[in-house]
Image (spheres, rainbow, N blue to C red):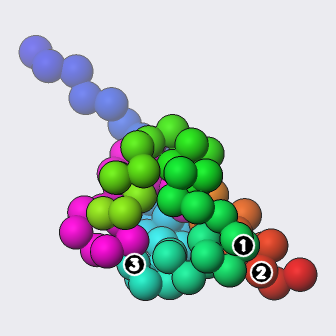
C-alpha cells in the first residue's frame, strides 16, 4: 500500500497565488533592472545559477517547486521596491 500526502486547501491557495504572482518573462527582467540588480544578484538571492535566471527571464524555462516559491518571493520584494 502506498502512502499519499494530503496537502489540503492552504497548499492549493498558495500554489494558485504563486501562479498569479509570477509575471511574464519580460516583466521579470524589467523588475530586476528597475531595482538596479544584476542577474547574479537575483540568482544569489534565490539560490540558483545566473543561467537559470536568464532562462526564466527569456521564457525558455519556468521555475518549479521550491525554486518557484523563492523566485516569486524575490519578485514580490522587487515589485514592492519599485512601488515606493
Find disc 1 in the rendering and name its residue.
35
The answer for how far apart the CA atoms under marks 3 and 2 are is: 17 Å
64 or 84, which is in the foreground?
Answer: 84
Disc nearer the start of the sequence (2/1) = 1
Would residue 17 be found to the left or right of residue 45 on screen? left
- Verify CB contact (< 8 Å) between mark 3 and mark 2: no
- Is disc 2 in contact with disc 1, using a CB cutoff of under 8 Å? yes
Q: Position of residue 4 (x, y in %)?
A: 25, 29
55 lies left or right of 48: left
- Mainly helix, strand or loop, the magenta region? helix
As helix, strand or loop, the secondary structure at mark 2 comes to helix
The residue drawn where x is 25% and y is 63% is 61
Dot 2 corresponds to which residue? 82
Q: Is residue 17 left or right of residue 31?
A: left
> Would you call the spot at circle 3 few (<14 residues within 10 Å), some (14-19), or many (20 or more)?
some
User: Which mark is first along the chain, 2 or 3?
Assistant: 3
Instruction: Give the side of residue 81 with respect to residue 78, left or right.
Output: right
Residue 43 or residue 1, whichever sits in front: 43
- Residue located 50% across and 64% down the image: 18
Dot 2: within a 10 Å radius of its alpha carbon, few (fewer than 14), some, or many (20 or more) residues?
A: few
Which residue in the protein does label 3 denote? 25
Give the image location of residue 57, x and y in percent.
39, 71
Residue 14 showing in the rendered view: no
- Image point (10%, 15%), residue name: 1
Amino acid at each position: 500500500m502506498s502512502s499519499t500526502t494530503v496537502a489540503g486547501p492552504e497548499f492549493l491557495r498558495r500554489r494558485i497565488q504563486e501562479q498569479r504572482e509570477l509575471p511574464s518573462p519580460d516583466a521579470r527582467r524589467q523588475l530586476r533592472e528597475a531595482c538596479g540588480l544584476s542577474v547574479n544578484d537575483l540568482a544569489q538571492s534565490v539560490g540558483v545559477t545566473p543561467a537559470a535566471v536568464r532562462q526564466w527571464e527569456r521564457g525558455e524555462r519556468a521555475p518549479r517547486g521550491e525554486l518557484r516559491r523563492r523566485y516569486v518571493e524575490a519578485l514580490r520584494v522587487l515589485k514592492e521596491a519599485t512601488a515606493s
